[in-house]
Image: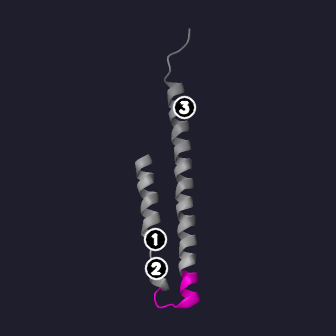
Amino acid sequence: MQVLFLVWVIWAATNAGGTPAECRGLTGDERELCNDANDVGTTIGVGLLIGLWAVTDFILALTYLIYRLANRPPRY
């Protein structure tokens, strides 16, 4: 699971590099503003992926803990 999320975050961060298609044809300040907006969107997207990663890890850890507690040998 960790490797999957790591690959997903790296892919999302590197895939957004360069000038997006929507910014082509723009010049000067308009192009710079468009590129900056793309960078902000990429940052938000990667942040959401990392948040999803943390929530998934928490749920998996909680599920494992409940499983371990349910399958422990009884005390006498």
Q: Quadrant of residue 52?
A: bottom right
Seen in the picture, residue 30 relative to 5 is either above or below; the reply is: below
Residue 20 circle label: 2
- How did the renderer colour the structure? one colour
Give the x, y percent position of residue 8.
Answer: 43, 58
Secondary structure predominantly adopted by residues drawn in magenta = helix
Q: Earlier in the sequence, mark 3 or mark 1?
A: 1
The answer, for residue 1, to whether it is visible in the render is no
The amino acid pointed to by label 3 is Ile
Q: CA distance from mark 1 to mark 2?
A: 8 Å
- Is label 3 in contact with label 2 (beta carbons under 8 Å)? no
Circle 2 sits in a helix, a strand or a loop, which is it?
A: loop
Q: Secondary structure at mark 3?
A: helix
Label disc, if present, on residue 16 of the rendered structure: 1
Residue type at mark 2? Pro
Whether 48 is among the magenta residues is: no
As shown in the figure, which amino acid type bears the numbered disc 1?
Ala
Pick the front one: 25 or 65: 25
Observer able to see residue 18: yes
